[in-house]
Image (cartoon, coloured by chain):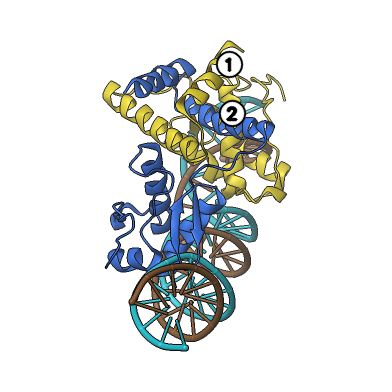
Chain colours: A blue, B yellow, C brown, D cyan
Amino acid sequence: MSTAPQPVSFRFRLDLASGVPVYRQLIEQVRNGIVFRSLRPGDQLPTVRQTAVDLAINPNTVVRAYRELEILGVIETHQGTGTFVSSQKVERDDVERQRQLDQIVSEFVARAGAAGFQIEDILSRLQERKSN
Amino acid sequence: MSTAPQPVSFRFRLDLASGVPVYRQLIEQVRNGIVFRSLRPGDQLPTVRQTAVDLAINPNTVVRAYRELEILGVIETHQGTGTFVSSQKVERDDVERQRQLDQIVSEFVARAGAAGFQIEDILSRLQERKSN
DNA sequence: GATAGTGTACTAGTTTTCTAGTACAGTCAA
DNA sequence: TTGACTGTACTAGAAAACTAGTACACTATC
């Protein structure tokens, strides 16, 4: 190596015993990485090949995860260059974004509600997270 | 009929075009019914057979949905009698419930975060819902 | 006990999901 | 241009998910 442009520090890990599909584990780890700031806009993700070798899986499995994340607008892939965390999530129409947030929240409330939790429970838990 | 014990008013509907598995649509509708109070503790759900006939699906598909809901503690099934919304969700260990809420919130935050929303966005949206 | 209602169990077929093998194509630096 | 890196495309097989057919067992009422 010569210039070592922005070394990739992010690393995947697998839990084969969990029963959760590999590609889904990868997606979740990237998402969490972004939320918890271990991945920042512009950061390069491990390459498809490197990840495949490291985890002893097929490149296509990595591709599948990256593709789904790209559809979500979370990352950007550039053939021949690499895969990167989106520098700025594409700004969408406000109405569309509002609808999207609404849908996520709806589903969430329904799920928590079915488990016997009230909106108050959720709110207080989120407040805690926010202050951390 | 003679006594007509608590007529079942809840009705399922299907969206075959959605691509969402039938049994999962049923689960979601029961969950939402509970959250939005169209289903209350003790209410009887449509019978396995009636639902199967109404929606032109196999009884086992309904059974699958009901079983999953029962595992979640949302409903209770009684062979020969019917299926009912749990009169009182089984009280669990506080620590266990805390963990459960934590997990739901975690997943939610990760998902919303990946879609570009901040905890603040979620909080304000939830506050709105609460006041409605 | 008979009967009509309820949920249950077992089996199986189709579809979808998930992963892999392998060859191809773009990018960049030397 | 060449070579070593990057992501992409096509194909296919195994596993899981999903739904259905059919027969059985429990419950309540008459």
Q: How far separated are the C-alphas under marks 1 and 2?
A: 18 Å
- Amino acid carrying label 2: it is Asn
Give the x, y percent position of residue B81: 55, 31
The subunit letter for the residue under badge 1 reads: B
Q: Which quadrant of the figure contains the N terminus of chain B?
A: top right
Residue at the spot 60% in from the left edge and 23% down from the top edge: B39
Q: Is residue C14 left or right of residue D6?
A: right
- Dot 1 or dot 2, earlier in sequence: 2
Circle 1 residue? B128
* Residue placed most toward the observer, B112 or A112: B112
Residue B5 quadrant: top right
Label pair 1/2, CB-CB below 8 angstroms: no
Above or below residue B74? Residue C16 is below
Q: Which quadrant of the figure contains the C terminus of chain B?
A: top right
Above or below residue A21? Residue B102 is above
Circle 2 residue? B32
- Amino acid carrying label 1: it is Glu
Q: Secondary structure at mark 2?
A: helix
Residue at the spot 45% in from the left edge and 64% down from the top edge: A81
Seen from this angle, which residue lies furthest top? B131
